[in-house]
């Protein structure tokens, strides 16, 4: 089921990694000496069981679903050491997204639901989450789930109604599915292959349902599988009750588990099937594991990682995790698993390798990153999102919001867009979360089967402007201009959510940038200064700013009007880049400035460079109201609203000619651009 400046304070968004421990668990390693070669005693060493390589560094998420009421998710390391335990309110299949959101199906309280919980590795049970549930969803005992990342969709095996249901990743509440897929028998688990747009479903009648071109046309998929096939083992026995399933794209092989009779703790099997993409009718498994030594009784879920398969075995002795290594080279038979961990009634398993996460879109520092640009067009009506290339060669409609305004836009690591909107009233101001914006039809507007909103009296959203994501903290940070405060929401908030309020000393903010390398939040204030909140992850800005940075020249602050809007931090040079609108009524008094040594700048800070018209010359900068900026570590993009352009300043920090009354490298005509963001490809 896939795919030190301040004292740290306890805070609902502040999480810390837990120490690795193995508590109350029994682990055995088949064919492994007590102290593995170069490894810690009792754990898998560098050489691992039987000389196999050590497991790749990973987090393993295991859902329990025991009759005693244990419905916890346990987070373990690659050697099955316990890192964290929590409950999501669901109890069935789970998956984890690149944004570290744990998505889990559930049938607790006799209600079908899909729950999305943020900060998957380190969360507490009480942390924010949102869910899809209610009569419109038609959810009935959903089990396995799979994610179609490119489209921002989640597919659920809906066992209570013999269907597959497709939902938007960002949707919340009592929403109808995007698509409903009929099945010839119930599916317990599913796996989606993005390379071929093919979905495999493990059916409880012992067959595998195959859907070719699954997302190309849901109206075709709705009629059922393209084909089905059953599996025979080396004794010519046919599969009975398939549950867990995973697919290796490179070799076109499926690994599938068979529960057999649910009441039996001894008849489970594990199959490896070749040529899965074209299999039809009845096929012979390449490899079958079965028998008393395997401990396979009710293997309800599995996940393939490389050539290792981890299995959630629910029946035997209260449940266990089983690990078979080099599954494609094994001969099968009645062979014990390489690793066994006793754990309560495991229902689902998800393995996420510990890789360096992609930087947040406001933290990109490598100009070689392939990207396009998204910007909001906010003319006062018919607000939308536009798309252009990094060369600014043309502009095209990306998304029609259907909102009366589109203020600031940003993106998370899952490809979802976050749009602040403001029509001057609290009832119609908020944040729209647009699921997988790159995959949407440009004519689309907000669709609650795909998207969700944060709005209402509890949100304190009156006139929200800049929105920043601190991806690894799991929060969104909103510059609330009307309320003269900064608001911090969980990335899993929905509806009338209550934020954490960050004091700005009564000065209205316009934009912010969180610098993860410093753990500092920089906020651009409309009085021409920058507020810096150090140690932000520990206290979320409690107590107000630690530093106020005032741009200056020769130790003298710039004369009013000064009105900072866009802001970005460059880690490589420890430099803040800020955009000054000046007077909103002027189309020629805008400025771009750099503030060096931003990590400790305080008080009057001389700018490194300042691009601006001195007022005594004909303006060539084209800077009137530079309301937002985006930076890729080399090139600076500016949403210039007063003059209706998107500007690019190539090599902005390093080109010495960019100082004073100089022109940008290139411009693109744009209708009332309000914000701009890099969109990684």
Image: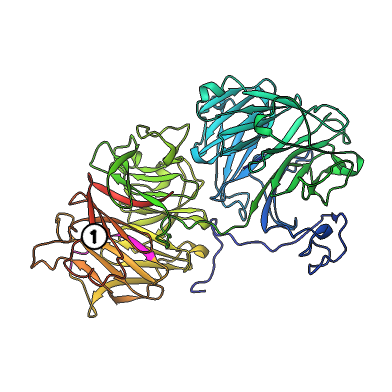
At x 69% / y 64%, what residue is drawn? 19
Name the side, left or right, on which 168 lies relative to 340.
Answer: left
The location of residue 17, given as percent across then percent down, is: 63, 61
In the displayed structure, does residue 112 sit left or right of residue 498?
right
Q: Is residue 564 magenta?
A: yes
Give the color scheme: rainbow, by chain, secondary structure or one colour.
rainbow
- Residue 284 is covered by the magenta coloring: no
Residue 111 in view: no
The stretch of residues the image draws in magenta is: 560-569
The answer to whether one can see residue 473 in this image is: yes
Instruction: Report the front residue among 538 and 614.
Output: 614
Tell me where residue 197 sits by quadrant: top right
Residue 443, position as x, y percentages in the image? 35, 32
In the image, residue 667 sits, relative to residue 38, either above or below, namely above
For label 1, the SS is loop
Q: Which residue occupies the foreground of this view, 516 or 137? A: 516
Q: Most extreme residue toward the right, as rendered? A: 292
The part of the image, by quadrant, that contains residue 366 is bottom left
Return the x and y of residue 226 as percentages of the image width and height: 62, 23
Q: Residue at coordinates 78% horizontally, 59% vertically from top-left? A: 22
Q: Which residue is mark 1?
A: 665
> In which quadrant of the rendered view does residue 657 lie?
bottom left
Q: Residues within 10 Å of mark 1 (few under 14, many from 20)?
A: some
The N terminus - image quarter: top right
């Amino acid at each position: 089921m896939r795919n030190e400046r301040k004292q740290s304070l306890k805070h609902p968004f502040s999480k810390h990694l837990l120490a690795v421990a193995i508590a109350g668990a029994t682990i055995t390693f088949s064919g492994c000496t007590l102290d593995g070669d170069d490894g810690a005693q009792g754990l898998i060493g560098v050489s691992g069981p039987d000389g196999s390589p050590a497991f790749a560094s990973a987090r393993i998420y295991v859902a329990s679903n025991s009759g005693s009421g244990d419905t916890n998710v346990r987070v373990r390391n690659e050697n099955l050491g316990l890192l964290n335990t929590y409950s999501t309110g669901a109890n069935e299949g789970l998956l984890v997204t690149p944004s570290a959101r744990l998505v889990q199906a559930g049938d607790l309280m006799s209600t079908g639901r899909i729950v999305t919980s943020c900060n998957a590795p380190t969360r507490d049970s009480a942390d924010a989450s949102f869910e899809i549930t209610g009569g419109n969803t038609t959810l009935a005992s959903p089990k396995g789930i799979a994610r179609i990342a490119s489209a921002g969709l989640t597919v659920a095996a809906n066992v209570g109604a013999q269907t597959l249901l497709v939902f938007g990743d960002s949707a919340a509440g009592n929403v109808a599915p995007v698509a409903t897929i009929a099945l010839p028998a119930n599916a317990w688990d599913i796996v989606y292959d993005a390379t071929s747009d093919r979905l495999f479903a493990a059916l409880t009648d012992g067959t595998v349902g195959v859907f070719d071109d699954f997302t190309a046309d849901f109206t075709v998929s709705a009629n059922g599988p393209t084909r089905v096939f059953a599996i025979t083992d080396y004794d010519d026995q046919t599969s009975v009750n398939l549950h867990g399933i995973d697919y290796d794209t490179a070799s076109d092989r499926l690994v599938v588990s068979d529960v057999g009779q649910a009441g039996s703790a001894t008849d489970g099997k594990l199959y490896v099937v070749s040529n899965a993409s074209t299999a039809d009718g009845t096929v012979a498994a390449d490899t079958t594991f079965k028998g008393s030594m395997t401990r396979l009784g009710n293997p309800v879920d599995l996940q393939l990682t490389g050539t290792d398969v981890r299995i959630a075995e629910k029946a035997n002795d209260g449940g266990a995790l089983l690990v078979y290594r080099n599954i494609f080279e094994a001969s099968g038979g009645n062979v014990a698993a390489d690793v066994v961990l006793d754990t309560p009634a495991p229902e689902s398993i998800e393995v996420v390798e510990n890789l360096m996460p992609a930087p947040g879109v406001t933290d990109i520092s490598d100009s070689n990153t392939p990207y396009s640009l998204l910007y909001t067009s906010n003319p006062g009506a018919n607000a939308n999102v536009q798309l252009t290339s990094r060369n600014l060669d043309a502009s095209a409609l990306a998304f029609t919001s259907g909102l009366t305004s589109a203020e600031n836009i940003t993106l998370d690591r899952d490809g979802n867009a976050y749009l602040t909107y403001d029509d001057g009233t609290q009832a119609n101001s908020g944040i729209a979360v647009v699921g997988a914006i790159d995959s949407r039809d440009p004519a689309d507007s907000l669709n609650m089967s795909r998207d969700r909103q944060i709005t209402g009296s509890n949100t304190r959203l009156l006139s929200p402007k800049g929105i920043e994501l601190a991806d690894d903290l799991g929060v969104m940070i909103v510059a609330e201009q009307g309320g003269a405060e900064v608001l911090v929401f969980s990335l899993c908030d929905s509806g009338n959510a209550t934020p954490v309020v960050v004091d700005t000393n009564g000065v209205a903010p316009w934009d912010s940038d969180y610098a993860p390398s410093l753990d500092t939040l920089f906020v651009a204030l409309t009085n021409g200064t920058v507020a810096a909140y150090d140690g932000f992850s520990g206290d979320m800005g409690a107590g107000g700013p630690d530093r106020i940075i005032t741009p200056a020249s020769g130790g003298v602050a710039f004369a009013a009007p000064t009105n900072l809007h866009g802001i970005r931090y460059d880690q490589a040079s420890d430099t803040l880049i800020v955009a000054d609108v000046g007077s909103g009524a002027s189309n020629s008094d805008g400025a771009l400035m750099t503030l060096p040594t931003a990590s400790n700048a305080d008080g009057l800070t001389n700018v490194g460079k300042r691009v601006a018209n001195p007022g005594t010359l004909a303006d060539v900068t084209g800077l009137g109201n530079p309301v937002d900026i985006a930076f890729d570590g080399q090139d600076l993009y500016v949403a210039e609203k007063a003059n209706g352009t998107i500007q690019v300043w190539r090599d902005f920090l390093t080109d010495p000619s960019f100082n004073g009354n100089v022109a940008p490298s290139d411009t693109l005509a744009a209708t009332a651009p309000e914000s701009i963001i890099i969109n990684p490809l």
